[in-house]
Amino acid sequence: MSDEPQTPTRSPVRTAPRPADPPPRTAPAAAAASSGTWLTRLLVVGLVLAALNLRPAITSLGALLEEVRTGLHMSGGVAGLLTSVPPLCFAVFGVAAPRLARRFGGAAVVCAGMVAIAVGVAVRPFAGGTPGFLAASALALMGIALSNVLMPVIVKRYFPDRVGTMTGLYSMALALGTSLAAAVTVPLTAALGGGWRAGLGVWAALAVLAVLPWIPVVRDRRASAAAAPAASPAPAADAAPPAGPRVARSRTAWALACFFGLQATGAYITMGWLPQIFRDAGVPAGTAGVLLAVTMVMGVPLAFVIPRVAGRMRQQGPIVVALGLSGLAGYAGLLTAPAAGAWLWAVLLGISNCAFPLALTMIGMRARTGTGVVRLSAFAQCAGYLLSVPGPILVGALYQHSGGWTAPLALMAALIVPQMAAGVLAGRDRTIEDEA
């Protein structure tokens, strides 16, 4: 038996590869596998809670604007300035969001934004005067501006294969937070004793809740960055884009900025003044808040429908005109029969306000490259928000000096006309790379 065939003759069978043997995991891969599930769930919760907080600071104030004016002894012009603070902050602070994200990370900046919202909303009712109220409002709006810019970046980074789904979820939560604050602020104020300060400050609790899921996300990101090899760092998700087209030379970019700014003007006038228009027409305060909620909630279904329809069309001008005509009909109704047809006017203005998702869709369609989209988005939104600042102030001043809503509503209707003209120009089938 000692003369058996040597082992080499049987080695091909004994050393055949075993299919059950998996390749060894590296430490980063194992860490990613173990933390991926809980991190994904936290990010979904964080995105939803953050989106819920991006409008209540604005719409809750619109529902109680008369009480705030009386309590702080504001004039109509100052109240109009207050309704212009949101777009001004979005234009000013939104520019800083990419730079802050490169320095600290997008998740950390969103987390800080939620903290700023919580502090600003909690402090402003007790700030002790109009200047303090405006400063605390600006703090909350700074957090909203930073988060508003960076949330789509986070969606693209962590959910690259589910961008549409997560964007839809984020948009729905944003519209829900907008309408929820408009609908329940007045009854919630009554339940808390009738004081407008408590009715405004209670929304800080929602922002505090939104901070919690982002804390472990930020810690996980920092831990992953520390564990990454120094010689081969991962590319930054929100790094500065390379050189691209000079957007300011594009007529389409300017048209899109004007369209964005004029639709933002209408949206913030609506959020700031629509409840007061209904209340002055004899509609109860609680019902006026619900009417604003109806206007805002129209954005939930239409935010899904309009971008899909617009994406199938070579030119988006027909949609621009349809939304503008809806706004004109709503303002005409407010002029002639504000109380009798209040629900219809609220629906029509809600449809008109859906020019916002259309503008975002056109930003993506008017540039061929990712760099062009980034530059066009920054240009159109910053220039557009700056353009929208005077509108609410002018409406407040007209309301104060005319003693009624005829002149302000005429102005609001008149602004729809250049909005449609700019939107038709921006909706033409061309890109900024062709023009710039």
Image (cartoon, grey):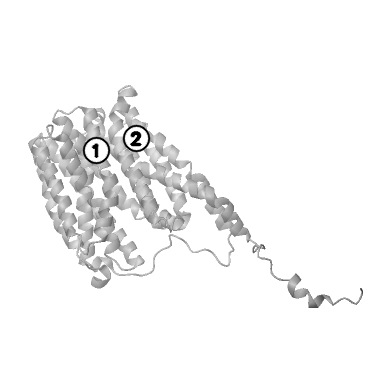
Residue 255 versus residue 52: which sits nearer the camera? Answer: 52
N-terminal of the pair, mark 2 or mark 1, is 2
As drawn, the residue found furthest toward the front would be: 1
Q: Which mark is residue 124?
A: 2
For the question of whether residue 278 can be seen, the reply is yes
Q: Secondary structure at mark 1?
A: helix
- Specify the quadrant of the image occupied by residue 310: bottom left
- x, y percentage for residue 355? 22, 51
Residue at 31% x, 36% y is: 180
Residue at 44% x, 57% y is: 157
| Amino acid type of the residue tagged 2 in the rendering | Arg
Q: Which mark is residue 294?
A: 1
- Judged left or right of residue 353, residue 181 is right
As drawn, the residue found furthest toward the right would be: 2
Residue at 20% x, 66% y is: 251
Q: Secondary structure at mark 2?
A: helix
Residue 308 versus residue 407: which sits nearer the camera? Answer: 308
- Judged left or right of residue 148, residue 419 is left
- Judged left or right of residue 407, residue 284 is right
- x, y percentage for residue 370? 35, 65
Foreground label between 2 and 1: 1
| Amino acid type of the residue tagged 1 in the rendering | Val
The 10 Å Cα crowd at callout 2, few under 14, some 14 to 19, many 20 or more, is: many
For the question of whether residue 359 can be seen, the reply is no
The 10 Å Cα crowd at callout 1, few under 14, some 14 to 19, many 20 or more, is: many
